[in-house]
Image (spheres, rainbow, N blue to C red):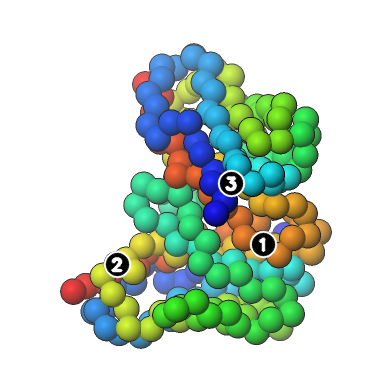
Amino acid sequence: DVKVTQSSRYLVKRTGEKVFLECVQDMDHENMFWYRQDPGLGLRLIYFSYDVKMKEKGDIPEGYSVSREKKERFSLILESASTNQTSMYLCASTKDRGSNQPQHFGDGTRLSIL
Amino acid sequence: KQEVTQIPAALSVPEGENLVLNCSFTDSAIYNLQWFRQDPGKGLTSLLLIQSSQREQTSGRLNASLDKSSGRSTLYIAASQPGDSATYLCAVLDPGNTPLVFGKGTRLSVIA
């Protein structure tokens, strides 16, 4: 079974801090994604990556950056955390582009910015 | 731009009922459609994936159908149980293999 592991289930940080959310997958998937999920707004794509050292902006990249130095790891960085970034963050992966295999998600990180 | 809609946003049924969840999408030229389940405070779990050339997929009490020409998919749950209570999301993958486009989900409550 594919396992997508997010480093923290719950995280509390202060405004202005630099915050790192880590995600690791164990099935050699090429594609990795970061979403945030807020009540009434659904899932919104922040950034994604189709290969090591590649990154693409999603629908709401402002205030975030990402890093993919190794294939299995995709990090989301909040450069200077703000209260409006309090949210549930979900990482996901898929095998490759054009694959008819499902997307796999981690358990999520509930991030609170105080 | 592809848009995915799920109606209703919430649904409450008594245990044992058969039920149908709906998903519609605006651009019928899709690569595949996926149904997910999400329990409160958790990530999404893949339930079924229907390729564009398929009409339906089944897993246990779940059956998902796809009608590309009308831009619709349904998830049929037979003999519902309280453990089926969750939010169900559908998502489509376009041929350009851009990221999945998600609906906002239907929150299902099965009452014992």
User: Are the two marked residues, 2 and 3, in contact with CB atoms closer than 8 angstroms?
Assistant: no
Q: Are marks 1 and 3 on the same chain?
A: yes
Upstream in sequence: badge 1 or badge 3: 3
Query: Helix, strand or loop at disc 3?
Result: strand
Name the residue rendered at 65%, 77% in the picture: B71
Which quadrant does the N terminus of chain B fall into?
bottom right
Q: Residue furthest right?
A: B96
Name the residue rendered at 27%, 83% in the picture: B16
Name the residue rendered at 69%, 81% in the picture: B54
Real-space Cα separation, disc 1 to disc 2, in angstroms: 26 Å
* Residue occupied by mark 2: B83
* Residue occupied by mark 1: A101
**Residue B25 in the image, given as x and y percentages of width and height:** 63, 70
**Viewer can see residue A68:** yes
* Residue occupied by mark 3: A92
Real-space Cα separation, disc 2 to disc 3, in angstroms: 24 Å
Q: Is residue A54 left or right of residue B68?
A: right
Please give the chain letter of the residue carrying mark 1.
Answer: A
Q: Amino acid at mark 1?
A: Gln
Task: Using a 10 Å C-alpha cutoff, classify the residue at mark 3 as few (fewer than 14 neighbours), some (14 to 19) or many (20 or more).
Answer: many
Q: Amino acid at mark 3?
A: Ala
